[in-house]
Image (cartoon, grey):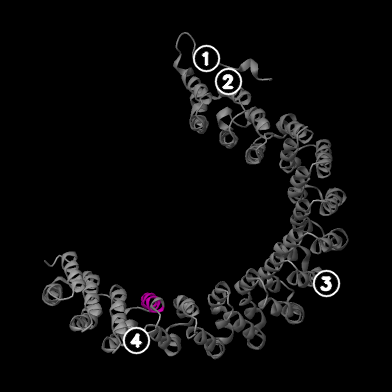
Amino acid sequence: SAGSCHSVSSSGMAGADGDDSLYPIAVLIDELRNEDVQLRLNSIKKLSTIALALGVERTRTELLPFLTDTIYDEDEVLLALAEQLGNFTMLVGGPEYVHCLLPPLESLATVEETVVRDKAVESLRKISHEHSPVDLEVHFEPLVKRLASGDWFTSRTSACGLFSVCYPRVSSTVKAEIRQHFRNLCSDDTPMVRRAAASKLGEFAKVLELEYVKSDIISLFTALASDEQDSVRLLAVEACVSIATLLPQEDLETLVMPTLRQAAEDKSWRVRYMVADKFSELQKAVGPEITKNDLVPAFQNLLKDCEAEVRAAAANKVKEFCENLPEDSRETIIMTHILPCVKELVSDTNQHVKSALASVIMGLSTILGKDNTIEHLLPLFLAQLKDECPEVRLNIISNLDCVNEVIGIRQLSQSLLPAIVELAEDAKWRVRLAIIEYMPLLAGQLGVEFFDEKLNSLCMAWLVDHVYAIREAATCNLTKLVEKFGAEWAQNTIVPKVLGMANDPNYLHRMTTLFCINALSEACGQEITTKHMLPVVLKMSNDQVANVRFNVAKSLQKIGPVLDSNCLQTEVKPVLEKLAADQDIDVKYFAQEAISVLALA
C-alpha cells in the first residue's frame, strides 16, 4: 500500500540509543497487534494522548501512515478509530495539515460494517469545514470522487453523505462535477446506494442554487419517489419536506405535488406511513392553499388507511394538522372533513390507533371552542373513557385539563364524571383498580374543592371493597392524595373517615384502618399522628380478633419513627409489652419484633 514505506516495527522505532520520546508509539504498536480486542480498543481510545506525546510532525509522518496501513480490525476498534480521527485536526498541526487525516478516514469509509462507515463519514464531514477552499478542491473533493466511483457499493454509499459539505465552497466547474456524481448515484444499480442518495437528497438540495434545484433535484426526486424499492421511495418523501421549502409557491403545484399525491397512495404501507409521519412538516412547507385543496383529502385517506400503522401515524397528527389549518376555514374543514374520520377512529379495531388518537384528541377542544366541544367531542371522550384498552383511558384522563379550560369544570363534571364513577364501581375489579391508579392524576387536574365534592366518597368506598387488591391500592391512593393536597386537608377530610372505620363490625375493615394509618402517618406528620391516629391504634390492641391485634403491633412499629420518644415510652411501650404476652403466637412474635426495632426493650 502507498503508506508501507512508513511502516514501522516497535523495536526499530525505539532505536538503539533507547530514545524515550519514541516509547509511546512502540507501546501503541505492540498493543495494536495484541490478541486481546479490549487492549487494542483501549490503545485507540488513548490515541490523542499518544499523538500529543509524539508532536504534530511525527503524528503526521509516522502515526497516521501506521494507522492507515493497519486498518483491518474488529468493528468496535475501527469505530473508535473513526471517531477519534474526527477530533484530530489540532494534533496534526491545525487546518493547514488537516488533509493528512483523509487517507485513514477514506479507508474507514469503505469498510463493510455500516456503523463504522457512518462514523467515518461523520468525521469527514466534521473536518471538511476545517479545509481551506483550496485544500477542499485539491484533497477533499478528489476523495469524494474516488468514493463516488468506487467499485464497492460501500464506498458509493459513503460518498452520498459528503457532497453537501463540499459543494458550497468549490468552483463552479467542480460544482458541476459534484452534481453529476450525485445524479449517477441516484440511479445506481444497487438499492443501498440509491437509498443513501435519497436520504441525502433534501440536504443536498438545500446547498444547491435554485436553478439547479429545479433542473436537477426535481427530476431526481421524481425518479427516486417512483423507485421499485419502497425503502428508497419512503426516503424521497422525507426529502420532499426540504425541497418544498426551497421552491417558490407557484412551482410547488407542478414540481412537487404530483409526486406527493402519488406517495400518499403508494402501494407500500411504509411509504404511506412516512407521508403520515411527516404530515405536519409537509403542511407547513406547502402552505395554506395546497393544504386546503390537496392535503385535506390526502389526510382523510390516511386516517382511513387499511393498515393500522398508517392510521395510528395519521391519528397522532390530528391535533397538529388542525392547528396549522388556515384560520379562516379551520373550523369548517375540521367539522366537515376531519371530525367524521376521527369519530370512526374512536372505535377502531386496533388499540394503537385508538391510543394514538386519545393522546391528541383532547387538544381539539381548544381549537373548536366550547359549543363544538360539548356537542361533538364530549361524546367521543366518553366513549374513549370506557374503552377496554387501559392506555386509551389513561390518555384521556391525563389530558382532561385542556378540556377543563375550554368548557369549565361544571360541564365536565356533568358529562365525564358519571362515566368515571361508573368505572369506579364496575363489577370487574381490574377496571376499578385502573381508575384508582388514575385518581391522584384526576385530583391534580380537577382541584381540591371539586375532588372533595365529587370523588372523595369514591376513594373512601374503595377502602371497604371486598377485593384486597382494591383496598390496598385505595390505601396507597390516599397517601398520594395527601402528598398533593397537604396534611391539613388530610386532617379535615380523610383522617376522620379512616378512623371511623376502627369501630366497623367487619374485622377486615378494622384492619384497613390500620393499613391507612401506616400509609398516612409519614405524610400527615407527627402532630396529627400523635393526636388523632395513635389513640385509635392503641385502643385496637384490645380487639377480639388476633389478626387485628398483631396488625396493631405492626402499625406501632411502622408509625414509631414519626412519634417522639416520650410518647413511645409512656404510651406505645406498655401496649407492646401487653401484646408480647398475648396468648396468640403471631401477636407475640410481631409485638416482640416491634419492641426490638423501636429499641424499647
Q: CA distance from mark 2 to mark 4?
A: 79 Å
Residue 474: image quadrant is bottom left
Return the x and y of residue 232 as percentages of the image width and height. Answer: 77, 51
Q: Is residue 47 above or below residue 451?
A: above
Q: Which residue is mark 2?
A: 62
Return the x and y of residue 293 as percentages of the image width and height. Answer: 83, 72
Q: Which residue is mark 1?
A: 13
Q: CA distance from mark 1 to mark 2?
A: 10 Å
Q: Which residue is mark 4?
A: 493
User: Considering the numbered disc 2 on the image, is that residue within a helix, a strand or a loop?
Assistant: helix
Of the two numbered discs 1 and 4 in the rendering, the one whose residue sits closer to the viewer: 4
Do the residues under discs 1 and 2 have CB atoms within 8 angstroms? yes
| Bounds of the magenta segment | 470-483
Circle 1 Cα neighbour tier, 10 Å, few/some/many (<14 / 14–19 / ≥20): some
Could you tell me which residue is drawn at 53 percent across and 25 percent down? Answer: 32
Which labelled disc corresponds to residue 276? Answer: none
**Looking at numbered disc 4 in the image, what kind of residue is underneath it?**
Thr
Q: CA distance from mark 1 to mark 3?
A: 73 Å
Near-viewer residue (296 or 471): 471
User: Considering the numbered disc 3 on the image, is that residue within a helix, a strand or a loop?
Assistant: helix
Q: Is residue 577 above or below residue 210?
A: below
Of callouts 2 and 4, which one flags the residue occurring earlier in the amino acid sequence?
Answer: 2
The image quadrant where one finds the N terminus is top right
Return the x and y of residue 596 as percentages of the image width and height. Answer: 16, 65
Do the residues under discs 2 and 4 have CB atoms within 8 angstroms? no
Circle 3 Cα neighbour tier, 10 Å, few/some/many (<14 / 14–19 / ≥20): few
Circle 4 Cα neighbour tier, 10 Å, few/some/many (<14 / 14–19 / ≥20): few
